[in-house]
Amino acid sequence: MIEPVNVALGLAALSAVLSVIATYLAVSDRDLLRALIFSALQSTAYAIIFLVLMAPDIVLVYVPVAVGIYPAVVLALIKRVGRFEGGEGGE
Amino acid sequence: MNEFEVSLSLIVLFSLFANTAIALYGVFSKPNLVKKLISMTILSDTANAFAIVIGYRAWPSPEESPVPPVLTNISGGYAAVQELAQRSVDPLPQALVLTAVVIGLAVTIFLASIILHYHRTHGTVEMVVSG
Amino acid sequence: MASRYLIAVSIALVVVSLSFAVAYGALGASVPLEGLRSLARAYVTLAYAPWNRTLTVMSPEAVTSIVWDFRGVDTFFETAVLFGAIIGTVTLFRGIKPSARIGEGLSAIARSAAAVTAPMILAVAAAIALHGHLTPGGGFQGGATAAVVALVILVTFSLGYLVSGLSKERALMLRSAGLLGIAAVALIPPILGGIVFQNQAKELSQFSYPAYIGGALTSGSLLFYNLFESLAVAAGLTLTIMLLLSPHEVVEEAVRGEDHERI
């Protein structure tokens, strides 16, 4: 029988490992749009960590901010300045 | 807490440290301003997550989880509040992170508009010094 | 390239030493803690304590109690930082008028779906903000959720549709109204003989906001702070999103006009 404490902490640990992978891909990818999507994935993993660590207040503010508004803002930015790192990008 | 639970929480802690390292590397060494902005939001999110992890507490018993610092049994009187204090997590880091997340969003929007104006003036967002 | 490796190695060294220190008790205890810190215990037990009327907040939500009562001045200045950033964005985009010309937007299906979901999100945001003193939630959470509605409308309908309902001036006015409301709720106690940011009666000053209104628990000033803060956050974030996503030509026009003035 698996104890509930192991399920909860295991979910947090799994999300933490997922967030490391997403962060690495977000920083290393030269395509800014893909980097933004990986960054949103990392935010989702953090939201799960916050939920498991009993912080419902933070989840309520973090989900609209980090998964809703922040990608839209950076998306608008990427649309103007060009999609690829190192290129003479933009309109 | 037995060995397994301790190692699980250490995985969370070390993952956050790894995220800090990767995000710092992105801020320092990537020449693209947008990439710097993305790395910086990851860095601030990681700092917030670290504060939440510090505010967490070990499980009182393997079946009984910690609870959010919200009193649900409001008519329970003094005994209910004492029972909540036996199981609740630390509310102070949550209160600090709550405002930090919203301020972080406003600062991100501010930086995004600065980058936009930079691109408008200079035609590029690459921070490479030639020569 | 050599400098890049130097950066990577030095960051790795810092992080390894930090994590080593934390794993061996540099925070004064193991993480996570076995019990509750004494400060946290005081916050949790005093948040709702009708038997201790001079120290309590009368709110079952410990986080909102800390945000708006135990550490109210702290939150006030954090709100000041938040609106400093928003005012900075508005200043960068000065002279730009988002036009109220209604564009095409997305397809009819997407627009109908948005028309159904947007009021629902708004209702959830209002519930989060107004129940902030009873359940998880509060002004910041409700305001951020309400700003998502503006984003949904902006994407599915058009910027002009949003601007025709909520112009730049009106958003600025709503934001200022929220800030004035926060200031008023904070300054009413000293006018009536209390202290700044006072909620419930203390030993030294007997001023107290009513903890119950019509039999419902409103936790004194927390309800009003949450209401005004959600208004201010929603209007401020909507304003900055509106300016940031305004069309390229409009911004270009405004910037060019500025150059001519300077010459």
Image: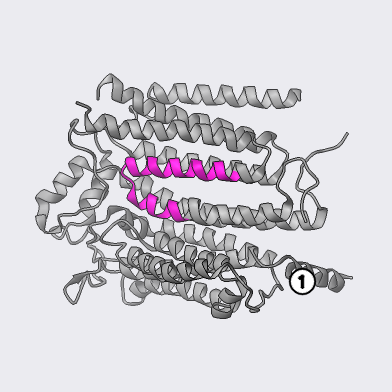
In the picture, the quarter occupied by the N terminus of chain B is: top left
Q: Residue at x 47, y 71 (%)?
A: C112
The answer to whether residue B116 is left or right of residue C211 is right
> Which residue is at 45% across, 56% downward?
A64
Residue B83: quadrant of the picture: top left
Determine which residue is flagged by label 1: C254
Residue C223 in the image, given as x and y percentages of width and height: 31, 68
Residue C3 vertical position relative to residue C245 in the rendered view, above or below: above
* Near-viewer residue (C210 or A70): A70
Q: What residue type is labelled 1?
A: Ala
| Foreground pick, C145 / B10 | C145
* Residue drawn at x 82%, y 69% as measured from the top left: C256
Give percent across and percent down for residue C164: 58, 80
Q: Is residue B38 left or right of residue C27?
A: right
Q: Does C195 appear in magenta?
A: no
Quadrant location of residue A38? top right
- Percent from the top left, x then y, of residue C89? 63, 63
B101 to the left or right of A2: right
Q: What stretch is highlighted in magenta?
A: A36-64
* Subunit of label 1: C
**Is any part of residue A86 visible from this angle?**
yes
Main SS, magenta region, reads: helix
Check disc 1 and report its element: helix, strand or loop: helix
Position of residue C217 measured from the top left corner of the image (x, y, whole percent)? 21, 68
Q: Can residue C32 be seen in this view?
A: no
Residue visible at 24% across and 47% down?
A: C42
Vertical arrangement, residue B122 with respect to residue B59, above or below: below
Q: In this rendering, is residue A10 above or below C95?
A: above
Any magenta on residue A50?
Answer: yes
